[in-house]
Amino acid sequence: MSKPLLVVESPTKIRTLQKYLGKSYNVASTVGHLKDLPQKEMGIDVDNGFKPKYSTIPGKQKVITALKRSAKDASDIYLATDPDREGEAIAWHTADILKKKGRKFYRILFHELTQKAIKEAIAAPSELDRKKYDAQQTRRILDRLVGYQISPLLWRKVKGGLSAGRVQSVAVRIICERERAIQAFEPQEYWSITVHLEGENPPPFAAKLVKKNNKKLSIPDAETSQAIVKDLSESNFTVNRVIRKTTRRNPLPPFTTSKLQQEAIRKLRFSAKKTMLIAQQLYEGIELGPGEPVGLITYMRTDSTRISQEAATETLQFVQNTFGQEFTLDSPRFFKNRKKVQDAHEAIRPTAVANAPEKVAPYLSKDQQALYTLIWKRFVASQMKEALINNTSVSIEAGPYLLTASGSSVKFPGFMTLYMSVDEEIASDSAKRKPLLPDLQQGERLALQQLVPKQHFTAPPPRFSEASLVKELEENGIGRPSTYAAILSTIRTKGYVELLKGYFRPTELGYIVNDLLVENFPEIFGVNFTAKMEENLDRIETAEINSLAVLQKFYDPFKNLVEEATHGMLSVKGVGLHTELSCPECQKTLHIKVGKNGPFIACSGYPECSYSRDYSRDEKGQVHAIEPEVDEATDKFCDKCGKPMVIKRGRYGSFLACSGYPDCKYTQSLNSNRASQTTGVKCPQKDCSGELVERKSKRGKIFYGCNQFPECDFAIWDKPVSEPCPICKAPFLIEKTTKKDGTFLACLDKECGYKKSIENDDQAS
């Protein structure tokens, strides 16, 4: 009798599972999705209940053949794909591919890859979850309806290759609106006054002026500040009230996906994408010795803060043995979960608290060790006693004025001995820098030492970092934690935003696309609408609403908007976006347009007037023309005509050209170009001896071109990798990243279709 088959998503799980299951099961992998909507058509039958048309993903036929071979005559198939919506969809498609008369399919969920969890899951299989599959399929259909009907509009109106996404476009909108709020911000002057005082007991301390006549005091300018300083210098300072109390500070709950991403960004400087990649490795299994792969953390895509009774009890015992009874709770601490959906998963925690970071360190990479330590400490700290903080606050009277001073000290560190979040560390450091308050008594007279007025200006709202953007998306209910990494990666890859010094800023292309989408689809690409749609997907999973009803309610008004935009959306290729600038040659208005090299400004009188320039924006977002750079003289001479050579700047960077152009068109590459960051990949152009090097376009986008430019103009956007294609023998592969497949290597020849996964990117849950 043929052995049952256990099917997982990732091939890296196979070894871990086979270790615990022995030879009783065959184990095979789908290597991600097997089926999806077709690439070259929408694949949704709108008139037939939005029925999707699935097809085998190109390059997956070999995987399917291997799955069928592994299944053989097995009568039982256990589908153990990831325990989220994407995993459920993969399970359904796998069952459809492997269906056979008399064959039974079972759904099992691995929330952690440990021996106990694996055997318990197999012992208690369930059925495939139709509601979860419907929720995933509805999301996929919605994304396809939006992407395949709005993206072509952008191709016609702006430029080819652009895309609009139901969620990604809202993220771009949030970044654009924040940038415009910064540009529109007008700083307001205000002043603060710090008073340095001394009581009967040391040390001296500082107090802040806060009120006058029991009303909050606002000091708008230097003149007002000077008048108050004069009043205070003639006043008596008396302690009005002293409040001393001890407060309890409880630890934060274990990580959810979004909180892990935020903390890893801030503490470890990991991107959201890198965090999820490393977490996936820790979940799937690390070899703790020869042939001993162990999943170190529970499933890393979760909205829940729930933890099991067993894990909590085990941790209490560990805390008592390691830190002592004074740090140990009388009973486990559990955290209330706000989310109703996806509570099947626990919070992210170590599978065995005994696997302390220092114990497993020899088996982990530096990045794996850093992330595991973060997860382990946060979880263990959540089961430690709260910290006790002594707080003292003092109010001081000076005539009609009221001042306050405060201080704090740690009475008992509790969980803070092991772990503090970034915000807690900042608060702790700030408290340490403040001198302790002296022992003050009500009615005590204080001696004035110094009055320090200080000018301030209100600050604009901050730009979004990766961490704060993830927080913004989460708080507004946009997307799901498992999609955040993909969202942040996609909006950068598409060139809509750039990350400068750790903060997101819109590109010109981002502004243009965002403005067109918001003008023509204001509700669909709005925060509230997108969040409501995410709620509806959750409600489909819990059977509160019907998938077809959600799709129909969305599509009817959406279809009308698409038809209106087809005719009414402004063409940036043609008319262009209006600016306040006038053409210096004919005085007509300059418009922003988009060409093959990106956005530029051009005269609205074209073709009668052909004036055009690159442009930039100032701090207030105003457009300014960039006059072309003057050619730079050199000491070289043209090999053909003998005239001086000059440095010119073209589409692919700087190069040497004859100053006799256009009569002499001789060009030569700069030596600096030849020394650009090489990829080690030879240029594929026939009879070219050059190498592909990393370059930047005029817009700052990375591409890869031949170092023999301008003699050879071969260039590609995707990073070349010095590895021949095993199918068509092409000399190198290219590295690509997509939301669906993550980062993978592919053949440059699309007809070949070879793909090789090099990481497991985040999938929408």
Image: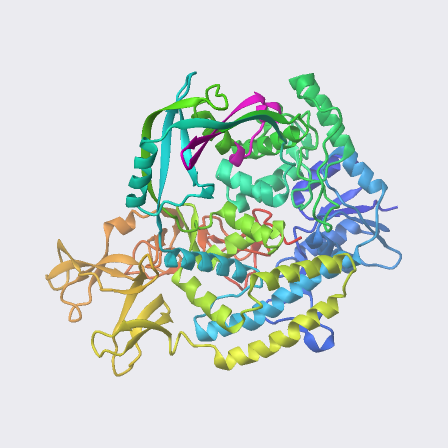
Range covered by the magenta-colored residues: 395-424
296 in relation to 139, above or below: above
Residue 663 horizontal side relative to residue 32, left or right: left
Quick check: can you spot residue 357?
no
Let me know if residue 401 is in the magenta part: yes
What colouring style does the render use?
rainbow
Q: Closest to the observer: 761 or 498?
A: 498
Residue at the (53%, 61%) spot, across then down: 170
Farthest residue to the bottom: give it: 608
Q: Residue 664's x, y, as percent?
A: 16, 68
Residue at the (69%, 69%) spot, across then down: 551
Q: Residue 76's x, y, as percent?
A: 85, 49
Q: Closest to the observer: 464 or 448?
A: 448
Residue at the (28%, 82%) spot, across then down: 607
Q: Residue 355's x, y, as percent?
A: 66, 26
Residue at the (53%, 43%) spot, across then down: 274
Let me know if residue 232 is in the magenta part: no
Q: Quadrant of residue 496?
A: bottom left
Residue 303 horizontal side relative to residue 420, left or right: right
Q: How many marks?
A: 0
Q: Residue 82's x, y, as percent?
A: 70, 48
640 in relation to 583, above or below: above
358 in relation to 164, above or below: above
Residue 358 horizontal side relative to residue 649, left or right: right
Q: Closest to the observer: 501 or 239?
A: 239
Quick check: can you spot residue 305?
yes
